[in-house]
Image (cartoon, grey):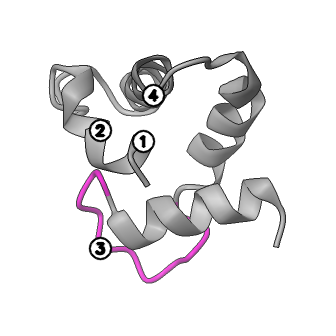
């Protein structure tokens, strides 16, 4: 399993937006964006910001929870 697939599987398992989708590919577009930017992240905080900004762009800042800390559990894994 490659990096993109692992990120997508993690997002599907954690389901940060609460979509409860039966489609395992539900978060593929977000996983692709995150994987493209992953190597630029030097700290967990930077990764958290990338994840947050990705979900803000794909959904909205309101739906993404308003602050990057909402995604701390994803970036700690």
Q: Which numbered disc flags the more N-terminal residue, 1 or 4?
A: 4
Q: Are the residues tagged 4 and 3 within 8 Å (C-beta)? A: no
Nearer to the camera, 32 or 58? 32
Mark whose residue sits in front, 4 or 3: 4
Question: How far apart in space, not on screen, are marks 4 and 2 (Cα)?
Answer: 11 Å
Position of residue 71 measured from the top left corner of the image (x, y, whole percent): 29, 38
Position of residue 27 measured from the top left corner of the image (x, y, whole percent): 53, 56
Quadrant showing the N terminus: bottom right
Residue identifier under label 1: 75
Mark whose residue sits in front, 4 or 2: 4
Residue at the image point whose x is 50% and y is 64% from the top: 10
Question: How far apart in space, not on screen, are marks 1 and 4 (Cα)?
Answer: 6 Å
Residue at the image point whose x is 27% and y is 51% from the top: 17
Question: How far apart in space, not on screen, are marks 1 and 2 (Cα)?
Answer: 7 Å
In the picture, the disc for residue 62 is: none
Q: Which numbered disc flags the more N-terminal residue, 4 or 2?
A: 4
Q: Residues within 10 Å of mark 2 (few under 14, many from 20)?
A: many
Mark whose residue sits in front, 3 or 1: 1
Residue identifier under label 4: 44
Q: Residues within 10 Å of mark 1 (few under 14, many from 20)?
A: some
Residue identifier under label 2: 71
Which stretch is magenta?
16-26
Position of residue 76 measured from the top left corner of the image (x, y, whole percent): 38, 46
- Residue 49 left/right relative to 60: right
Element under label 3? loop
Q: Are the residues tagged 4 and 2 within 8 Å (C-beta)? A: no
Residue identifier under label 3: 20
Element under label 4? helix
Quadrant showing the C terminus: bottom left
Question: How far apart in space, not on screen, are marks 3 and 1 (Cα)?
Answer: 20 Å
Q: Quadrant of residue 15?
A: bottom left
Q: Residues within 10 Å of mark 4 (few under 14, many from 20)?
A: few
């Amino acid at each position: 399993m490659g990096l993109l697939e692992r990120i997508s599987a993690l997002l599907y398992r954690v389901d940060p937006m609460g979509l409860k989708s039966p489609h395992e590919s539900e978060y593929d577009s977000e996983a692709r964006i995150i994987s493209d930017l992953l190597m630029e992240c030097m700290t967990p905080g930077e990764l958290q910001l990338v994840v947050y900004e990705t979900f803000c762009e794909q959904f909205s800042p309101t739906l993404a929870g308003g602050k990057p800390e909402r995604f701390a559990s994803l970036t700690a894994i």
